[in-house]
Amino acid sequence: MTADDSQPTPGSAEPGSTEADLIAVRRQKLARMRELGVDPFGGRFQTNTTPEDLQQSYEDDRKVRLAGRILAIRDMGKSVFFVIGDVHGRIQGYLNKKAVSERDWDTWQLLDRGDWIGIDGTTFTTGKGEPTVKVESLTVLAKSLRPMPDKWHGVSDRELKYRKRHLDLMANQESADLFVLRSRILAEIRAFFHERDFLEVETPMLQDVAGGAAARPFETHHNALDMPLTLRIAPELYLKRLLVGGFPKVFELNRNFRNEGISRRHNPEFTMLEAYWAFADFEMMAELVEELICSLAEKFFGTLKLEHKNEEGEVVRTLDLSRPWKRASYHDLIKGVAGTDWFDLSPEQRRDKAQNEFQLEIGSDLEDYEVTQQVFEKLVEEHTFDPCYVTHVDAKLIPLAKLNPENPAVIDVYELIINGQEISPGYSELNDPDVQRARFEEQSGGETQQIDHDFVETLEHGMPPAGGIGIGIDRLIMLLTGAPTIRDVVLFPQLKRKD
């Protein structure tokens, strides 16, 4: 039996102790450490390996120096098996009273699950084949004053997982693995764009005019300048300024902020990738996104068929990312669910049909094109699971995209739908400043959008034709990992304050 498989060892507190009792016992141990001259909160500890690296490149009779949190203990009196580790990996340790100093042995008696230690020792393999470090000396790095979550049940309460992510990462290896994976996926995304000669740039998060999307911003005030500012809702207008300045390929992995609702697909603070490619169009950007997502699936999961499971581990859906991905026009998809005569009806008839036949909530303030968009979102988007590029949407929906030369009522864009939600929009970018000004003026009647006159002036200096994309990184991670909610892929999701 390894330490990681053992039953918990009873501590100084009696079974059934309250958290306050357990904290009191740990504080007594803290005081005793100080009496022994041991610093309970350590300092620099130089390592030559990690638990993960040691497991991956293990060999016997190797002198090692490593650190980690105590995750499990099996005390056998004069010897102890234990496990130390972090989010990347873990390794078993073995400590024998005769093999360490009296001070180290006394110090060990004051340690608990959750404490951080450094150990020096030599590797060996137990009779049961478990790679192990025989401890020759130990160093206390941090005494944990609160107990870890129960080893056997972990953190199962979802709200607790989100409010106290540190406990979730301690107790649930699946959560830790997911966030390590997220970091590696982000690194791979950066490498993908760097390999294609895109420059990574940074644009302002505090903006005078919240542009690049129709969304309600968070508002603030800059005291020194005595002016109102907003947190950005999108970086688009600044990235296009860089096209005007002569950067042919740029991208930014950025944080955006939208003062809107919270749902399983929405967090007010989220991560977005935007990229712009001079002399390209929306079709070239679609190919780029398809290549990116497929390369991520194959690199990290070894397949283009992604299984999504429920909380019981049952497969509820398998997404097929095999190329080429489907392309369909917005109007054709609407006709497929609302009837071939949908666009021949009067606005009043469309509203009536959406409300009474399709049972959609249609607010009295919605314009006719927004009624059609509601039909699309509820009857098409939410029922589209394998990848589909929805092309040539209504021109009124996106004021920053180029009008289709054959039908100026629609624009040259795609919206990539996978697993019932939009993953990425892509445009042939509008670069005519006069048309852009007119499109802004048409949209500016809403409270959440102002005209960015400085951006229009920038376009007057000449922006090359270009393709642009946005990819919601949080939704992409949900797609790849099968996570059911955005809160599972954001380390610290926004939650309502507890009273």
Image (cartoon, helix red, strand yellow):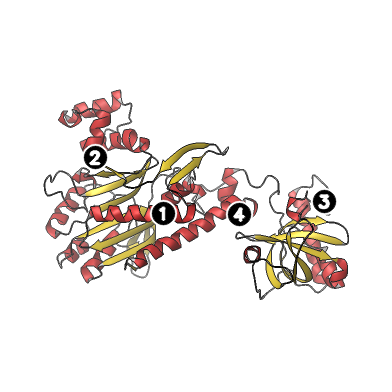
Which label sits on residue 473?
1
Closer to the chain start, of discs 4 and 3, is 3
Mark 4 is on which residue type? Leu
Circle nearer the viewer, 4 or 2:
2
Return the disc, 3 or 2, that comes first in the chain's sequence: 3
Q: Is residue 39 above or below residue 441?
A: below
User: Residue 414 appears at what percent x and percent y?
Assistant: 26, 48
Name the N-terminal-most of marks 1 and 3.
3
Task: Specify few, some or many for label 4: CA neighbours under 10 Å numbering under 14, 14-19, or 20 or more.
Answer: many
Would residue 341 appear left or right of 229 to someone viewing this image? left
x and y percentages locating residue 297 in the rendered image:
44, 52
* Amino acid at circle 3: Pro
Q: Which residue is mark 3?
A: 10
Q: Quadrant of residue 295?
A: bottom left
Q: Which residue is mark 2?
A: 330
As helix, strand or loop, the secondary structure at mark 3 comes to loop
Please give the name of the residue rendered at 74% of the width and 50% of the height, measured from the top-left corner. 5
Label pair 3/2, CB-CB below 8 angstroms: no
Check disc 2 and give the amino acid type. Tyr
- Given contact means CB atoms under 8 Å apart, are the residues at marks 2 and 1 in contact? no
Q: In the displayed structure, does residue 129 sit left or right of residue 450? A: right
Q: Is residue 235 visible?
A: no
Residue 160 visible, this angle: yes
Q: Judge by depth and name the residue closer to the eye, 116 or 133.
A: 133
Q: What is the quadrant of residue 347 in the picture?
A: top left
Q: Is residue 261 left or right of residue 364?
A: right
Q: Residue at x 22, y 71 (%)?
A: 246
Q: Which residue is mark 4?
A: 169
SS under mark 1: helix
Q: How far is the residue under mark 4 from the one under mark 1? A: 21 Å
